[in-house]
Amino acid sequence: MMALFTMGLLAQNDLDVQFDLDNLNALAAEPNPEVAAGAFALLGVVWLVSIVISLMFVAGLWKIFSKAGKPGWAAIIPIYNLIVLFEITGKPIWWIVLFLIPVVNFIAPLIVMILVYITLAERFGRGGGTIVGLILLPFIFVPMLGFGSATYQAGPTPDT
């Protein structure tokens, strides 16, 4: 066993890997326009993809609101869209307060949105697959629910 350990140490010495730190600092000091252009191109692509995903989500939410008889434009108003979503799913409006309380707002929105997505899928007559999709990939399943053939079925109103 000791022989294997010694051979491993000798093998590391045989690699003869050396780092030229002076040259590394010189490389970091020189601006490289190709690297900067590539980084900006990558950031541009990420930005463009995030804008497209956001627009798809808002469009899907708009259609969901319209199917439920609510104004579609509510999808683009930040806190009002949660109020409308809670009305559609029959959840109490005061749950929005949980989004605003420090420390509580780390986990409460996650739990609240899971409960909202479960009820939303049920109100549109969808099953467990759509529920899992809404929870894990809402940017895909919200537009599918909005633009799909599912129809809204109103449920009981919440006790506030």
Image (spheres, grey):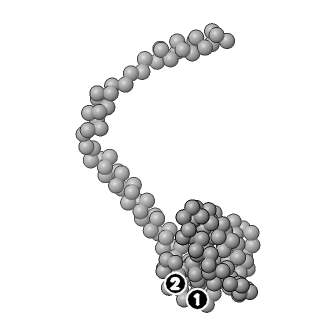
**Mark 2 residue crowding within 10 angstroms, few (<14) / some (14–19) / many (20+):** many
Most foreground residue, 159 or 45: 159
Quarter assignment of residue 6: top right
The N terminus lies in quadrant? top right
What residue is shown with label 2? 74
Identified at 53% across, 81% down, the residue is 80
Left or right? Give the position of 118 relative to 103: right
In the rendering, at what x and y percent does residue 119 appear? 70, 76
Could one spot residue 153 in this view of the protein?
Answer: no
Q: Secondary structure at mark 2?
A: helix
Does 8 appear above or below 31?
A: above
Q: Residue furthest front?
A: 102
In the rendering, at what x and y percent does residue 96 appear? 58, 75
Q: Secondary structure at mark 1?
A: loop
- Label count reads 2
The label number, if any, that marks residue 113 in the structure image: none
Identified at 74% across, 86% down, the residue is 156
Q: Residue furthest top?
A: 3
Identified at 69% across, 65% down, the residue is 132
Mark 1 in CB contact with mark 2 (< 8 angstroms): yes
Left or right? Give the position of 40 relative to 12: left
Most foreground residue, 107 or 23: 107
Identified at 46% across, 64% down, the residue is 49
What residue is shown with label 1? 70
How far apart marks 1 and 2 lie (CA) works out to: 8 Å
Does 43 appear above or below 72?
A: above
Could one spot residue 39 in this view of the protein?
Answer: yes
In the rendering, at what x and y percent does residue 16 appear? 43, 17
